[in-house]
Amino acid sequence: MMFALVDVNNFYVSCERVFKPKLEGIPIVVLSNNDGCAVARSNEVKALGVKMGTPWFQMKDLAREHRILAFSSNYALYGDMSNRVVQILRDFSPDTEVYSIDESFLQIETVAHLYGGALSMGQQMRQRIKQWTGLPVCVGVGPTKTLAKFANHLAKKNPEFEGVCDLHVIPRQERVRWMSGIEVGEVWGVGGRIARRLEAMGIHTVLDLRNASPKEMRRHFGVVMERSCNELRGISCLALEDVAGPKQQIMSSRSFGRPVETIEELRESLASYLSRAAEKLRKQQSVSAAVYVFIQTNRFNQDEQYNASVTVPLHEPTDDTLTLTAAALSGLETIYRAGFRYKKAGVMLMLLSDKQRRQMSIFDNLAATQKSTQLMRALDTINRDYGHGTVRSGVSGFTQRWAMRNENRSPRYTTRWDELPVVR
């Protein structure tokens, strides 16, 4: 086996810099929804000691001192840039697993020789992605997915690898040296809590975990840790997932840009969130038999608190936005209480099943089902071609004063005609 992990460096920050090259070398943070916390930091900001998840208000003095620029999250841009990277990677290997928005695994043992070996292939991937998208990536290659992830860490942190690390060509003693110098918490799948437990057992480094007994790891932590231990030994336990399985639940929720008090604005928000969830539902060819609705106040305020939720079952599983919206709004009517300042609301589509295998009942109206399918297909086509929200249910409103804050969002350069970059 030969796996490659391709990871875009500082993905959100790099996307912002592609269209504004003058930002190179300038400290940048990208903020979460409502411009709350840092979800991405440039290397310059990391060097200042800013941790992931630091609230923006806590770093404003530091930002003024070091001229840190803050950007609101631009998910339309990030998602499109991610898709472009994946398309390039699939030209190199048809066996590609999109692991996250900025990481992809490739299985390359059958194609690496076409590019002069894994190291040369990795450099060609880096060069093409840089040329075609402007994004910098690092590549790690190993006999297992966990070792490929480890190799990617080495490539990213050590300039001598020039962005590509292939463990196959590193002598054993050198591999041991690298493993002995990296904390066990850097192993893929080992979080902070597990790392502390491992350290209490005397397992402090990647090498320590590699040398630990897999059966002992399974006894203390379960089968996942046993697999990680074996993977570090070069025994492949995790296969490439070419196609992600359909989700069993689909959630859509947001914090409001300002407190919401009226049921009318809550209706607008839930209808908007439901529209996005239903779109994802249809994309994976599923139907939903129940809608979960929740609303909540701001637990960090001194105001009186109120949190409520309800699950609304449907008579028949469906993917129709209008039917699902009606169910969500009926649920809202039962849980809404006046006099509270709501901070967040959301919906979850539950009891999902394959649309093609849906069991029909004797009361099904075939003509109405076909009409709904045609309407939803037209809705999705228009929104795909002309932008999300071009056609939507009227209850979702137009002004949407409750929408989350994104005052510092850069243009959606690649997905909106009216925001295309202009060359002078």
Image (cartoon, rainbow, N blue to C red):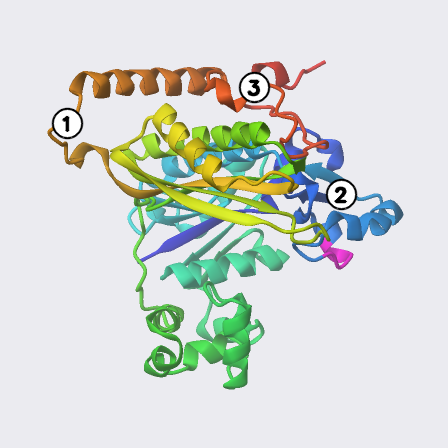
Check if mark 1's residue and mark 3's residue have beta carbons within 8 Å. Answer: no
The answer to which of 238 and 1 lies nearer the viewer is 238
Which amino acid type is marked by label 2? Gly
Which amino acid type is marked by label 3? Arg
Q: How many marks?
A: 3
Residue 82: x and y in percent read 50, 36
Can you see residue 252? no
| Mark in the foreground, 2 or 3 | 3
First of labels 2, 1 by sequence position: 2
- Residue linked to disc 3: 416
- Residue linked to disc 1: 363
Residue 309: x and y in percent read 47, 46
In the rendered image, residue 314 lying in the magenta stretch gets the answer no
33 displayed left or right of 251: right
Quadrant location of the C terminus? top right
Element type at marker 3?
A: loop
212 displayed left or right of 29: left
| Mark in the foreground, 1 or 3 | 1
